[in-house]
Image (cartoon, coloured by chain):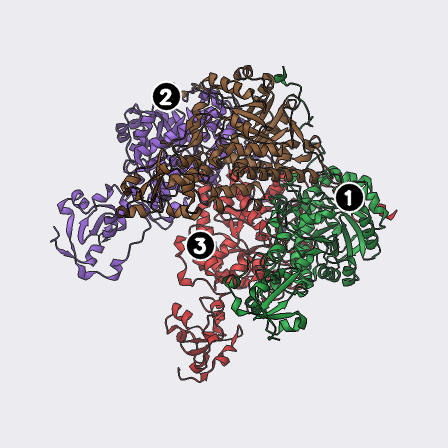
Chain colours: A green, B brown, C red, D purple
Amino acid sequence: MAEGRLLSVKEIEKHNSPSDIWIVVDGQVWDLTEFHQEHPGGSAIILKYAGRDASKAYNEAHSPSVIKKNLRQDQFKGVLDQSTINNEWLKEPPTENARVMLDNEKPPLTTLINAHDFETVASKTVSKKTWAFYSSAATDLITRDANKSCFDRIWFRPRVMRNVRSIDTRTTVQGTDLSFPLFVSPAAMARMIHPDGECAIARACERKGIMQGVSNNSSFSVEELVEAAPNGSFFFQLYVNPNREKSAALLHQISSLPQFKAIHITVDAAWPGKREADERVKADEDMGVPMSNVKAKNDTKGGGIGRLMAGNIDPGLTWDDIAFVRKHTHLPVCLKGVMSADDAILAMEAGVDGLLLSNHGGRNLDTSPPSIITLLELHRRCPEIFDKMEIYVDSGIRRGTDVLKAIALGATAVGMGRSMLFATNYGQEGVEHLIDIIREEFETAMKNSGITSISEASPELVNTGDVDHLVPASRLHPYARKITRGPKHHRTSKI
Amino acid sequence: MAEGRLLSVKEIEKHNSPSDIWIVVDGQVWDLTEFHQEHPGGSAIILKYAGRDASKAYNEAHSPSVIKKNLRQDQFKGVLDQSTINNEWLKEPPTENARVMLDNEKPPLTTLINAHDFETVASKTVSKKTWAFYSSAATDLITRDANKSCFDRIWFRPRVMRNVRSIDTRTTVQGTDLSFPLFVSPAAMARMIHPDGECAIARACERKGIMQGVSNNSSFSVEELVEAAPNGSFFFQLYVNPNREKSAALLHQISSLPQFKAIHITVDAAWPGKREADERVKADEDMGVPMSNVKAKNDTKGGGIGRLMAGNIDPGLTWDDIAFVRKHTHLPVCLKGVMSADDAILAMEAGVDGLLLSNHGGRNLDTSPPSIITLLELHRRCPEIFDKMEIYVDSGIRRGTDVLKAIALGATAVGMGRSMLFATNYGQEGVEHLIDIIREEFETAMKNSGITSISEASPELVNTGDVDHLVPASRLHPYARKITRGPKHHRTSKI
Amino acid sequence: MAEGRLLSVKEIEKHNSPSDIWIVVDGQVWDLTEFHQEHPGGSAIILKYAGRDASKAYNEAHSPSVIKKNLRQDQFKGVLDQSTINNEWLKEPPTENARVMLDNEKPPLTTLINAHDFETVASKTVSKKTWAFYSSAATDLITRDANKSCFDRIWFRPRVMRNVRSIDTRTTVQGTDLSFPLFVSPAAMARMIHPDGECAIARACERKGIMQGVSNNSSFSVEELVEAAPNGSFFFQLYVNPNREKSAALLHQISSLPQFKAIHITVDAAWPGKREADERVKADEDMGVPMSNVKAKNDTKGGGIGRLMAGNIDPGLTWDDIAFVRKHTHLPVCLKGVMSADDAILAMEAGVDGLLLSNHGGRNLDTSPPSIITLLELHRRCPEIFDKMEIYVDSGIRRGTDVLKAIALGATAVGMGRSMLFATNYGQEGVEHLIDIIREEFETAMKNSGITSISEASPELVNTGDVDHLVPASRLHPYARKITRGPKHHRTSKI
Amino acid sequence: MAEGRLLSVKEIEKHNSPSDIWIVVDGQVWDLTEFHQEHPGGSAIILKYAGRDASKAYNEAHSPSVIKKNLRQDQFKGVLDQSTINNEWLKEPPTENARVMLDNEKPPLTTLINAHDFETVASKTVSKKTWAFYSSAATDLITRDANKSCFDRIWFRPRVMRNVRSIDTRTTVQGTDLSFPLFVSPAAMARMIHPDGECAIARACERKGIMQGVSNNSSFSVEELVEAAPNGSFFFQLYVNPNREKSAALLHQISSLPQFKAIHITVDAAWPGKREADERVKADEDMGVPMSNVKAKNDTKGGGIGRLMAGNIDPGLTWDDIAFVRKHTHLPVCLKGVMSADDAILAMEAGVDGLLLSNHGGRNLDTSPPSIITLLELHRRCPEIFDKMEIYVDSGIRRGTDVLKAIALGATAVGMGRSMLFATNYGQEGVEHLIDIIREEFETAMKNSGITSISEASPELVNTGDVDHLVPASRLHPYARKITRGPKHHRTSKI
């Protein structure tokens, strides 16, 4: 094989795009165009060396035979003509999108003992672009950080000397049993972090008895997910398409799958937020989102993936669309992304089946309210809503204590997005481990606050004194007057 | 040419002041006294090498021929006598006022994606003095920082499921159309940062359909600005001169230019603030302000430029001067720098046409209130003002979300000063890019908070719960008693 | 002796577990299995070198003869066969559990002048595991830090010109005299930090006239403590055992010792908190807790010692157990760990003799309320309790001023746990020194706030304005509505 | 001279105490016992080399002849016997108390433009002990820091368009004219920082028309101060001596000096605070306080100077002592250190002539209230006091804006202590420069807030919304109940 035709550096360098990848390993030139998507170590590392010599990186990670075993004879292109090597060729390629650590350098899963650990490991082991996409949030990150800090500023009021030998964490969401009140919040394109992506999450949720929210921008189709976890429970996070027929078709497709228990219409992303960390890192332009047919690209604003997926999202969504959705599904219909009691009240009037209080993890409109504050606003302004529909909360949950605080304040279940994606870095096993961690934290919090079942969790369990001044008491601003725009009466300069 | 007369190091070193600059490049001695002001890379770099050998710096930035092409034959003074070189000569000059980066080292404009980026780049690429002048604020920087943090502590109350497919950001200021409610706040001497200075800003504003506030200390005359942007819209920020005749003349000059739409009398700078960063950096003493005939200088208090411009500002300004101004202009008359509802009420009584709530970017009196808090104070104490005149806000605006918050709370338009100057670092193109950024952030915020036009922006859109305790409810202190000074009744020691 | 049989590296390396320790010093092989527990420098350093060559570490700390003097002839095992030395053998062992400093490197006791100093020294001189066990707290450390910061946010209202020449700091706890209102809070396994452990504390407390709380997980038995300090005063912190008979026996044993003045039933640790720093450091698996027969171990969750002691704690503890305890002791019965006025009210109804307000030093449930806030809650909601029983406070006390604040707010005495353990690092002398420091700080605070006896300490002495919003005013949440779980009425999707 | 007798290292090393100092310079041995106190560079540097070779340090700072010129023939002791030099001799002495910079390395005075600058320079140029003594404050520095931050949290409510061309900053204190409402707060032992100590301050105050408070622990006698500044104005800060006769004598001595305008009885230092930074640095044991006959010493608690001066302070001071003081002086009698409205009310009843609200710069009781908060408390609880006596404020003032805020809230004048001492580092000139700085900041603040005289300064000028929750509204705690100590009623265990 090593006797293939001689290929010059100049020739090899041409094959440097995702759709045409040649790579040199130990003097042999291979075509990895087909293979790079299946590469267990991620395509980023291969793209990094497209049109270049990858021997050093290859040999650090693999034995010499691996390449031959994984590639076909016809993917061998020839032999590097050593006489054509120049200085440029010898340089390391820019490392922008490279992983900082290889998979085999990750710390063992058992040494990760909380959600923060998964985030820390991800920050060091996933590609720059993946990290940027998942970790980023809108502009100054104020809402992203407040999501967490508002939970931290709510204190427990623990009760003692209550028999907590055995506790029951079970609950139901839209009639479906959950082992404890947690679900995985829908998030786009989990394949960026692991080849099994949402399938890994699906299997982990199925195994641990929690629900998975599936993003419209999932890297796997709903059929693939259902196949991965036939006994799983899912809800679907719908971005209503400008072309309603596409959404209708999708709703029918989903509604035919018994594993899907609800439709969540996304309402907190009328327009893509400005996620600057995401914009600052170039996208791998070959990266695609199967379900939505979107391709990443770099433009004058940067390489933001979130922004590019918005083409399939209709900013013209209105309350009337609830009827449209209902027409195409028999499933309960919820709204994902309500951020005010005002819209919660409209949702009651519209008769929806549930609300997911969410600010999209702080990714869309910076300084939008933390979800836990919105939950408090519902108590202050429309407490009757808790009798009429299920309320869920996500954005900022990192601890089992956070879950219990939301439940105590009336949430039916609580979602974790980012953390679960960072756990997907370890595949199904990672997600299972994180679910176990949160469950154990949640159980510990129940026991140490003196309750034994979800039904005992009540607002009396928490002290919100440090955040109460942040909770609006009415639709109107407490003292600001409504503005009348237009020409002013008192324009003396006109005199 | 290289055969000019031999010049000793001792001779050359004498020509080291802004009014007499000789510089050695590759052994040739040039007189740059005339040229240095026009130097595209700024005069600072030339002043740095006045009376010295600039070969190294020159060659890093220019090809050998550039100097000959730009200078006249008579500006060639002779040839360095190599035999007179001593150790002192070989040392690099002190870099105090040098740019940290040359123009060609600036990051490409498209990689700057928010206002902070422009500030960061400016901090590294403009001369120390320019940076000190623009970035500085009064004493402990408390107001400068609170200007921004108070915006950050105001949250949105976003509404969902409203059709935001098409939005209209247009508004009017004093009857003039703006593409969106932004203007460039007036700031002195933009030539310090770019040779095109305020002209670059004027062209960018004209192109983007926003208004420019022109400082009394502009480095270009109003005629030059109007020539640069004949279809632009301007307002003039007047510092009333101790010599009222000068101000009267200026008002007539401005009022004759149809591009000028209003006069803003500066009221927040009775006395120059103590901007310590500015004082700590030596001024280039040849630096002048065309319109106000002020020259920078260094004195025992430091090199503060702001302080030196104050000679043309009358600390004796009173409410009576409004009549004086009106007498010399037909234009709407606004007050720039009102910081209390008390003065807003007086302004209503005086019948002015608008207020620009401003604390001079925190540059004048430290711990004066953030403008957005003053805006809230108007609602609490004199809400009728919003029917009587236009209210503008500047100081601390860095984001499109900040603009929307001010608009929601009743501002007609919002000004950005410092950020726009930092954008001028890239000339007209830089300012346009920043305007585009803010506009896009503003539009994103409108869409994600569920409104489609300026008239829909209302106080209900924001939650000010975290800052409400900072908003005074009356003219009097809530519990402190008025002090009677003078001898006390109870002086027992007199007994 | 040096002529013992030749032992190969391979042979020696086998003896590397706590139950079988061989160590090489200067070519001689010794069996330290028995001795390592008695090693004055701690067993950690010996375990570190189990199965290895410890010559370097030994010679840094000891003279050559020490080993022979301390070990028996039969503990000499032979001579290292130098020919078997390999590279692995020459490496330093991992230092995870090693002390950073040897005892003789500790700063002199007199240079430690406050409680923080003891913590700092401990962080550098105790083994990693000991540090992790004592310094750790639940999850995000929010309660641990708030315990201290809430004291810091309470201000004195000092009174002046009161004769404070002589002050009286004496008080009584359950009828027993204390020289000042301090006790050592019970904490587990003080031998980890010093071989004298709780005995050192007992002697110091006896000498300084304060009370010692003895943990159920003390490394010494109550008999040993009483023998160490026959004139001391103690209370016993009981973890009620799932096997009530064991607790009954223990209560009888304690009640027979006249030095024990009260029983504190632990109620703030229904379930072990998640102390992540503790989990992250491997436990020495031979480490045991004499009184409770617990052995440390490492499992998939980590090496947390706190968690492993929980096997002897009954999560089924209820209010009925107070009667059980009373049945087996004539001593006053207190509850340790009440965190709400609600439970304080139940405690009044149950007729207990005292409450120790405590959140276990923030070690059990993160975001549980700081004890000083709970003390304030008692004033707000059940002030009559101060007439009915003694109230104690611990968690977060680091200063004599903290003690005075708690006393002023009605506490009878105040406990310090962690700091006292860190002082035990210096043995009895260290604990005495810290008690002296706190006493002097307390006296200084009394004098400078203008009081001369404990009875003059009253709530008027403190200003709690900065924390009052954190104190609940009623059992119910101020505005959140009680949640009814279960199917919702308004499920339109069912229609 | 160099032919003196040979002296061995062993001999020389004996002369190493403040009362017996030999030093070797360039091989010659000198006795500096007498001289070291007069050394312009401070005695610390000489003490550092007592019994050692100081050649290196000497030659870095002085020309060879200086020593001969300044010392007498009989102070030359002999010549170092080079043959006795050993390794120990060659080591540098510990640098604990050395200055970090020599006087000639200080930045030029004109480059210091605010009070912080003086502090920064002092931290680098004064001896460690001096820095520790002046910069230190009680325990955790909470009050020291809150003193400043509470000023920063008070905002101005600036008024505009008021003619501020000419302003009048003059005021009177106890009938004495001040050029502006500032005085130097009394502080001990200014000679530690400069040989001219309080005399330098006296001359500067005289020249700038402000008043100087003289500490009972001044390093110069009142006669020396009056001689230094015969036209100056002073008040005396009295520590009432346990031996009242000594205080009586002192009062007579002071009252006979017409430059003294008032007596301030110190009431905020019943007991010396625990200033840990001071304790941690060894004292120069020969350092003395002339007026109080105190000598510094090091004991088991450390080297705290403040603590050692307390021997002359009577903790038995009571309200009755006011009559004692009045009996021995005709001067107005004020109390320095009142920290509550309660004591202010008592002071009114006692008919004193003024109050200096002070917490001793946070040096005595940590978490005692910032003075500006106490000033607000007077408004809330006993506003009539402002008609009855003069109120002064110190502790935390760093800016002219701070001065204006206190004046606006009713203070007659404001004192600066630490900053003025740090300015004394530059002698009289330094203090004058700092007074000029504060005066200019004060004037700028008056102008930019729209007032032209002290009488116009009123509470309406400031917004205290961010600190109002810290101001007590009554003598009682708002909700805590008074504690009854002693046996409890409900001791069920006794049954």
Amino acid type, callout 2:
Asp
Relative height, residue D176 to residue D476 (above, below): above
Report crowding for label 3: few under 14, some 14 to 19, many 20 or more residues within 10 A (C-alpha): many
Q: Foreground mark, 3 or 1?
A: 1
The residue lying toward the viewer, choosing from A329 and D353, is A329
Provide the secondary structure element on which disc 1 rests: helix
Q: CA distance from mark 1 to mark 2?
A: 70 Å
Relative height, residue A182 to residue D455 (above, below): below
Provide the secondary structure element on which disc 2 rests: strand
Q: Are marks 3 and 1 on the same chain?
A: no
User: Which residue corresponds to mark 1?
Assistant: A386
Where residue D143 appears, x then y in whole percent?
47, 39
Where residue C318 appears, x then y in whole percent?
69, 54
Q: Chain of mark 2?
A: D
Instruction: Please say if the residues under marks 1 and 2 sit with CB atoms less than 8 Å apart.
Output: no
The residue lying toward the viewer, choosing from B232 and C298, is B232
Q: Chain of mark 1?
A: A
The residue lying toward the viewer, choosing from A238 and D395, is A238
Is any atom of residue B396 visible in this view? Answer: yes
Is any atom of residue C309 visible in this view? Answer: no
Relative height, residue A347 to residue C252 (above, below): above
Amino acid type, callout 3:
Glu
On the rendered structure, is C493 left or right of B188?
right
Relative height, residue C89 to residue C119 (above, below): below
Residue D246 sits in quarter: top left
> Which mark is on residue C432?
3
The residue lying toward the viewer, choosing from A52 and C172, is A52
Q: CA distance from mark 3 to mark 1?
A: 57 Å
Residue D222 sits in quarter: top left
Amino acid type, callout 1:
Phe
Q: Foreground mark, 2 or 3?
A: 2
| Picture residue at 17% right of the left edge, 44% below the top | D71
